[in-house]
Image (spheres, rainbow, N blue to C red):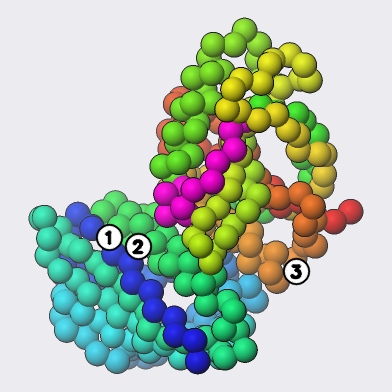
Amino acid sequence: MPALNITKSIHINASPELVYTRVFDFKQWPAWSPWLCAEPGCPLTYAEDGSSYAWDGELIGSGSLTRLEAVDNEKIVCRLEMLKPWKSTSEVIFTFAAKDGGTEVTWTMNGSLPFFLFFLKGMMTCMVGMDYDRGLKMLKEYVETGAVISQIDYPGEESVGGFEYIGIRSQCKITELEKSMLADFDKLFEWYDGQDVEASSKPFTTYSKWKFGSGTCEYTIGLPFEPGVVAVPSGFVKDCIPKCEAFIVRYTGPYRNLGNAWSAGMSRQQAKVFATNKKIPPFEIYENDPRETPENELITKLCFPVKN
């Protein structure tokens, strides 16, 4: 059986006692779980003694998590049993260590894939690792502020695209995506601020390649312009996003939790809520300016092109 071993950590500005209780109590998991946010209406059942909980979702599958061992404020060991989309059993461990006036939380999973899915090991390691990173960030926000700012809506399908753009195309490690995109946006807007023409629409990012085996991705950030109004500067690209129908996921909140919306959209794609147009990569449109908008009011529109 192909082994699947994942370990992720984060520093939280709170005592080990406080962080421990947020993880120990399964009824608090819906506030920060990186999976339940994709299907908030997923049926959940809890053991009377609080030692386990189970889920049975249409989008996120079904399974259970059972606490096997706990050392107050130091360690929690659980058994994760997945029933759908495939059966598997894994060990899940949380450790809590006082560090720099707060707590270093480490989340580990030791499990395996069914033998017939051996070729997915690299992809699953990367994807589950991204989920763990996202969950730990939300746990940090939940513990430190009392809530996670992440609102997701599904307005349906609409026509999007149909514009030319000037942009920057980059490839980077998935773990460095946020840093790489910020640098590219700074470069894009430094150029744009020197132009005497207005963009014809809002800035966007399109994601063309995800190579989970190597842990890299390729993306393009851009600004739409009317054809021929600006020259393409050195190091930039000129391209277009064709007009298409797209399934829309509308996210409101800080960019640090934007992965929740992508998880929600991808889970619906996998559940065949909509039929994917594989010729056009998905993209996100930034509806307001982060330089002028409070982060809890930022709106990002995720567009998943669909077949006509």
Asked whether disc 1 touches disc 2, contact meaning CB atoms under 8 Å apart, the reply is yes
Label 1 vs 2, first from the N-terminus: 1
Residue for point 42% across, 60% down: 134
Residue for point 75% across, 29% down: 164
Residue at the spot of label 1:
10
Residue for point 55% across, 41% down: 170
Q: What element carries label 2?
A: helix
Label 3 vs 1, first from the N-terminus: 1
Q: Taking 4 as reference, is 200 above or below it?
A: above
Image mark for residue 268:
none
Q: What element carries label 3?
A: loop
Give neighbour class at mark 3: few <14, some 14-19, many 20+ (Cα, 10 Å).
few
In the image, what residue type sits under mark 2?
Leu
Check if residue 126 falls in the magenta segment. Answer: no
In the image, what residue type sits under mark 1?
Ile
Q: Tell me where the magenta segment starts and ends, as one range.
A: 167-177
Task: Give the left or right position of residue 66, taking residue 191 as reference.
Answer: left
